[in-house]
Amino acid sequence: MEITAKQVKELRELTGAGMMDCKKALVETNGDMEKAVVYLREKGIASAAKKVSRIAAEGLVNVVFEGNIAILYEVNSETDFVAKNERFLTLVESIGEALLKLMPESTEAALAGTYKGKTIEETLKEATASIGENIQLRRVTKVVKKDDETFGYYIHMGGSIVALTIVKGDEEVAKNIAMHVAALNPRYLSREDVEQSFIDSEKQILLNQALEQNKHEAKPKPENIIERIVEGRLNKQLEEICLLEQAYVKDGDLKVKQYVKNENATITNYYRLAVGEGIEKRQEDFAAEVSGQIKA
């Protein structure tokens, strides 16, 4: 019987077990969801479900290299305390070694990849059980450069942010741009990369703001002046979000594009990961928790 990805996903949501374990359980039970749940429970695999459901928004980001290939990845834990634990640091390092051997094209491929006799997903499940927190490999990105290009990277605060750049130029320039990317988090490389839909939307918002402000002016500005104000504000926004247009972090008198030009370099691409970005961290209401325990 063929087991579908939808079935595996459903069983994983029901039990919190790993993807490969869910697939095996469904194979063993001919796709019977209820029997698959029982199978996982009997194997002791579903017992980690409660831990897996907890939010893992702390952890570390890292980058590893092999020739013209770099792999950025994020390993999450629930607390910053565990993220600084020696066992967790060793785990992050060993996952980096595994990723360089596997060279996965996606996070899913990384989790399913086998290294030293077990999948990365199995390794994470074991770490979850032994450390006592939900440990997740959340993101994996493989980056390939050309022979005439240079990698530059910067890891902030031991792994809270990692930035990677690909530059046609020397290593120092590449590293300096990586530091800049880590600090200022640009959304785009250049103005040409900004979607027209974004520009149109922002322009309309700025126009509405300017028109509203103009209503309350003692001497309202004419339409052509309003248009110039909007263009100026839009240009300022683009300077803030485009890497090449930003003020260079090490010399505010220079834009990044001027700095790389002075160094006879060209930025091909850049990448940035920050721990937990995009994860909605649960806010604990300790007063309500204590109150609930008293009432119970």
Image (spheres, rainbow, N blue to C red):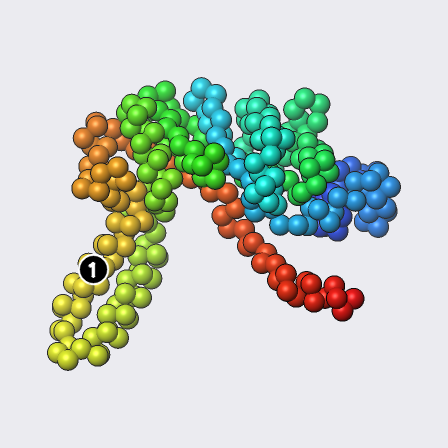
- Is any part of residue 269 visible from this angle? no
Towards the viewer: 194 or 59:
59
How far from the left and from the top, in percent, is residue 224? 13, 68
Q: Residue at x 64, y 64 (%)?
A: 287
**Numbered-mark total:** 1
- Is any part of residue 150 visible from this angle? yes
The picture quadrant where one finds residue 126 is: top right
Question: Which residue type does callout 1 highlight?
Answer: Glu
How many neighbours does mark 1 have within 10 angstroms: few (below 14), some (14-19), or many (20 or more)? some
Q: Indicate whether 240 appears above or below 88.
A: below
How far from the left and from the top, in percent, is residue 175? 34, 29
The picture quadrant where one finds residue 110 is: top right
Q: Indicate whether 158 appears above or below 49.
A: above
Q: Indicate whether 175 appears above or below 59.
A: above
Q: Residue at x 78, y 66 (%)?
A: 296
Is 202 on the left-hand or right-hand side of 82? left
The picture quadrant where one finds residue 243 is: top left
How far from the left and from the top, in percent, is residue 8? 72, 44
Q: Residue at x 31, y 49 (%)?
A: 241
Q: Quadrant of the N terminus?
A: top right
How far from the left and from the top, in percent, is residue 261? 20, 32
Residue at image mark 1: 231
Q: Residue at x 25, y 49 (%)?
A: 239
Towards the viewer: 160 or 246:
160
Towards the viewer: 57 or 64:
57
* Secondary structure under the numbered disc 1 in the rendered image: helix
